[in-house]
Amino acid sequence: MDLLHSTWFWVLAIVGPIVSVIGTLAKLSKKQGPIKLPPGVIPGTYATDKQDDEDKADGAAKKP
């Protein structure tokens, strides 16, 4: 009887985390819809590093 109990323990100890990882990955793989923004907020894009550097250079030149 002790062998049976210890066997089920190891089966659950190994299979439990595997099932959890598979479930988490399945949940993350579903495509999510667009995020609802508050009224008056316009969705924008992030500036690339190059654009950010250009904006900083333009800003420094425009200062009096």
Image (tube, rainbow, N blue to C red):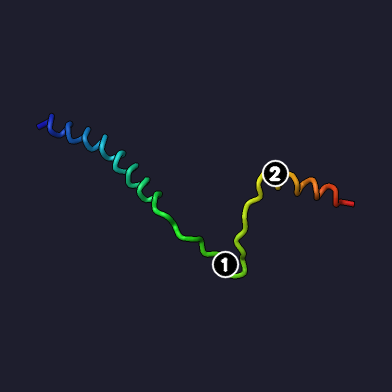
- Taking the image as shown, residue 36 lies to the left or right of residue 16, namely right
Residue 22 appears at what percent x and percent y?
Answer: 32, 43
> Which residue does the image show at 65% across and 46% down from the upper left?
48
Helix, strand or loop at label 1? It is loop
Instruction: Give the residue type at disc 1.
Output: Pro
Binning the other alpha carbons within 10 Å of mark 2 as few (below 14), some (14 to 19) or many (20 upward) gives few
Residue topped by disc 2: 50
- Taking the image as shown, residue 35 lies to the left or right of residue 44, namely left
Residue 34 appears at what percent x and percent y?
Answer: 49, 61
Foreground label between 1 and 2: 2
Q: Are marks 1 and 2 in contact (CB under 8 Å)?
A: no
Residue topped by disc 1: 38
* Alpha carbon separation for disc pair 1 and 2: 30 Å
- Taking the image as shown, residue 45 lies to the left or right of residue 24, namely right
In this view, the residue in front, 45 or 38, is 45
Residue 56 appears at what percent x and percent y?
Answer: 77, 47
